[in-house]
Structures are given as C-alpha cells and as structure tokens.
Amino acid sequence: METMETAYPALNELFVFLNTTITQISIYYSRIPGSAILLKYIKNSHQDDPFRTALELLLVFFAIIYLFTNKYRTDNNFIELTPQEVEELVDEWQPDPLVPQLSDDDKRELEKIPVINGPQGLKVKLINGKSLINFSSFDFLGLLTNVTIKEKAIETLKKYGVGSCGPPGFYGTFDVHTEFEKKVSEFLGTEDTIIYSQGFSTISSAIPSFCKRGDILVIDEGCNFAIQKGVQISRSVIKWFKHNDMEDLERILQKIKNEDIETGRKLTRRFIISEGIFENYGDIALLPKLVELKKLYKYRLILDESLSFGIMGKRGAGLTDYFDINPTDVDMIVGSMCNALCSSGGFCSGSFEITEHQRISGLAYCYSASLPAMLTVSASESLNILKRNPQFPLTINQNTILFKQILKNVKYLLLNCSKDSPVIHLRINEEIVRVGDIQDKERCLQDIVDEAINNGILLTRAKYVRSQELFGVEPSIRICISAGFTKKEIEKAASVIKNAVTKVLKNKTH
C-alpha cells in the first residue's frame, strides 16, 4: 500500500482535490432554496427517462454557448452618407400611389355611375329623382324592402345592440346564431350548419380549413373569385377541368388515379369543387354527374350554392332540391345570406364533423367577429318567408322564361346561362358584331347599360379583378331575375334592353 501511494502521489492529490471540491459544491448547492427539489427531479427524471436527461443537458450546454457567443452586429455595416447625399435621396424619392391611376375609361364610368337616393330594392330612385327598375341586384326573392324583416331587425337591434364584439368561439355566439344554424340544417336536410360573418370569406375559408399541402383539388375553371382565393390559400395540388365539362372532369380524375398506381403516391384528401349557379356564366352545375364521379373515384364534393340557395328547386333549397338528390351526397354545401336572404354572411352545411372542424380551424370563423344579431335575424326571417311562400322559385322560373323569350332573337348578343337559371350574362356575339379588345367590349356594354338607365332600367356590367383572375372572363352585362318583378316589368325591361342593344351595336356589324 505504501508502495502504491509513493508511486502515484499526484493521483492521490487529485482525488483529494476532487473530493474536497465536490464536498464544497454540495454544501454551497444545499444552501440554495429549492435545490433539494431540483436534485430530486433530476434523479427521478433520469431514472424514468435517461434520454430526457441527455436532451436537457444538451439544451443547457447550448444555452451557455449562446449566452457567451459574440452576437452578430450590424453597426459596422452602415454606409455613412453625407448630408448632401441624404438630401439628394430624399428629393429623388417618390411614394407609390395608394390606388392605381384611373384610366380614361374608368373616369368616364365613374362620371356615369348612378347614385341611389334611399334604400336598395327592386325599385330605386336616383338623386336626380329618376325612378328605375333594378335588374342588377341579387335580391332574387324581392325581400330587401320587406317590412316584417325590417321590424324584426329593429327589435333585435334594441335587444342585442349593433355588433357581437367578439369571435363566435369566444363570446360572440348568441342564441339567434344557433337557432339560425338549426333552421338552415332542417331546410337543407343536413346534419349541422356553421355560419360565417362574411359571404365572400365563407368558401375561401372553408376550403383551406380542410385542404392542406399535398391534398388534391379538382376544380371547375369557371368558379368564382372567392373559390379561386380559397384554393390558393390551401397550397394544395390544384387540377382544373373545363367549365361544366363532365367528360374533362372524368378524364382528369382517371389520370390522377393512373398516376397513383404508377408512382405509388400516398393517399391524401381529395375534393371536387364546383358552384351551383356559376357567378361568371349563369349556368347550372351538373350535380348528378358530379355526385356520380365523386362516388366512383372516392372524392369529397364541395358545392358553392351562394347564388342557387333560395331560388332553385321546388322549395328553393338549391341544387340538391332541383335535381332531387340526397343532400348527404354533397359533403359540404356552402351558401351566402347576402343574396336570396337579403342579409349578410354565409354558411357551410354538412355533417357534424364537417362543421365542428371549421369551428376550430376556419380562419374567417375563428378570427372574425360573429355576424351581428340583427343580420342573423334578418336572414332567419327571410328563410321563414321563403318557407311560407313556396311559389317563389316557380315565380322566378316563370319570369326567367319570359325574359329569355323576348331576348332570344337579339342577334347582337349571346345569352349565357342555363335554361332555368335567373342569372343571365349578356355577351357580345363576335360572329356578328365587330369589336376590338376587352376594353372596346367593355365600352360597348357600358353604352348599353347607360342607354337602359336612360329608359328606366338599372343594369350593371359584371366586374372582375382581372389582374388576379386565374382565367380570362369575357365582358358581360349581368342580369338577375327576381320573383318580385311583375310580368309587365319583365316585358318592359327585356324590350328596353333589346332596343338599347340594337341602338348601340347595329353600326358595328361585320
């Protein structure tokens, strides 16, 4: 033993030093408040999960390195400018305009825009005192000026106030919201419904709440701007099929299926997206074929019924009512309360799982104040009136047929719409009329609008954000037929439009 101690004197001194140091550290550590609890935590943690101890030590090590590492500084990267150079840069700087410069056509159009004095409706009065029949409004049921709805709205305003002051998921949901959701579900024949406070953001929020990166969306090229924005936000794989062309849709679905087999691609969520009545074309989606292909290729179907809800079918329940299809065959029925229900906001109806998922992942639902109670009650009362007056859809259809019969022989224009659609787009027939570019077509159509206004009929051109539209849409005059129009008013409007078209375009033929 003495020989070993003599042979390794330095090692003995090291052991003594380490033992003394550790003892001193233990004494000092024990004096720290809570040290015993921390030590017990470390022992138990290491015993239960050694990997966690290693990870925590690694994080502590990283924190120490980060704390003592020199920070990146930009102080030395500045370029020193003389006062004269600063003044020159300030003089040269020109701010970008808040809005783009108006073109000559825009200025002319703004000068001619009619200004309404008083409430909206099927009959309006301009500030110059001229009365017009309004064929530019989506007031399909003629309820914008309904007295009962106004009285209900005023009562609700006095009871609940103006706004909800909060998102639906927090403190913005009132009893009128849940009652209206139940009414819509019962009317459509679906399991549940969720309502949004803005019509545009309903579909543009519902789509990305389900569709994520890697999912596949097969969409009609004719879909409206809100759907286009929704699919862009989703960042999914997007496939477009030709407008209302079911053969092209089936071709794309089969192509995707073949690619899955060839590449062994992972199965993801897949959706077919279409509109009930297409806002940009006025035609009706072929829902029976959409449902057939959806079932055949195992896709989910999203149908935007913003325009068709309230006006299509025997009861006005939309395309499922019109084609006599079980509503459960459509996974998501999206609608707007801004049109037939003459209120604001939108809804998404489907299974309970569909709606509940949106209550926690729909951006426009979670981060927007809920729909004001008075607007909810207005939509609810409009739906009640529709239920009590099942003849409304039939009246709209009769007015639509009469209007088209009068205009069908106008050779200068094409009537773009389906047979029973009350949304009609009048587009220039280029086989007969000699026109130039889009701006030239817009000018000709605006001249027709102005001429119709001079003769007591309020029309509007369909407006598009062309810089952001994914597909080019031909200029048109959009006409909406309402159940509130009389036969005499329909005949007058069609005759005025026919005469205005002839007057403007007769000298522009080939």
Image: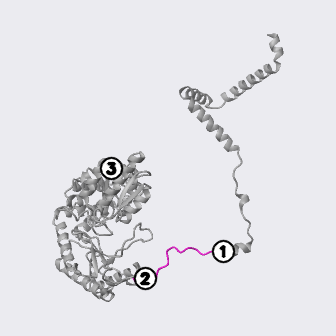
| Helix, strand or loop for disc 2 | helix
Q: How far is the residue under mark 1 from the one under mark 2?
A: 34 Å
Q: Nearer the viewer, mark 2 or mark 3?
A: 2
| Helix, strand or loop for disc 1 | helix
> Label 3 near label 2: C-beta < 8 Å?
no
Q: What is the number of the mark on residue 105? A: 2
Q: Residue at x 33, y 53 (%)?
A: 254
- Residue 292: x and y, percent? 25, 53
Within 10 Å of disc 1 (Cα), the crowding (few <14, some 14-19, many 20+) is few
Which amino acid, by three-letter code, is at mark 2? Asp
Q: Which residue is mark 3?
A: 354
Q: On the image, which quarter does residue 76 sit in?
A: bottom right
Question: Which quarter of the rendering shows the C terminus?
Answer: bottom left
Which amino acid, by three-letter code, is at mark 1? Val
Tell which residue pokes out farthest to the front in this image.
262
Q: Residue at x 42, y 52 (%)?
A: 212
Q: What is the number of the mark on residue 90? A: 1
User: Relative to residue 377, is residue 226 drawn left or right?
Assistant: right
**Magenta span has 415?**
no
Decide: is 9 above or below 115.
above
Q: Nearer the viewer, mark 1 or mark 2?
A: 2
Q: Nearer the viewer, mark 3 or mark 1?
A: 3
Residues drawn in magenta: 89-109
Decide: is 91 above or below 284.
below
Q: Residue at x 24, y 73 (%)?
A: 481
Q: What is the number of the mark on residue 180? A: none
- Residue 237: x and y, percent? 42, 55
User: Relative to residue 30, is residue 168 drawn left or right?
Assistant: left
- Residue 488: x and y, percent? 17, 80
Which amino acid, by three-letter code, is at mark 3? Ile
User: Relative to residue 393, is residue 161 drawn left or right?
Assistant: right
- Which badge, 3 or 1, is on the more N-terminal residue? 1
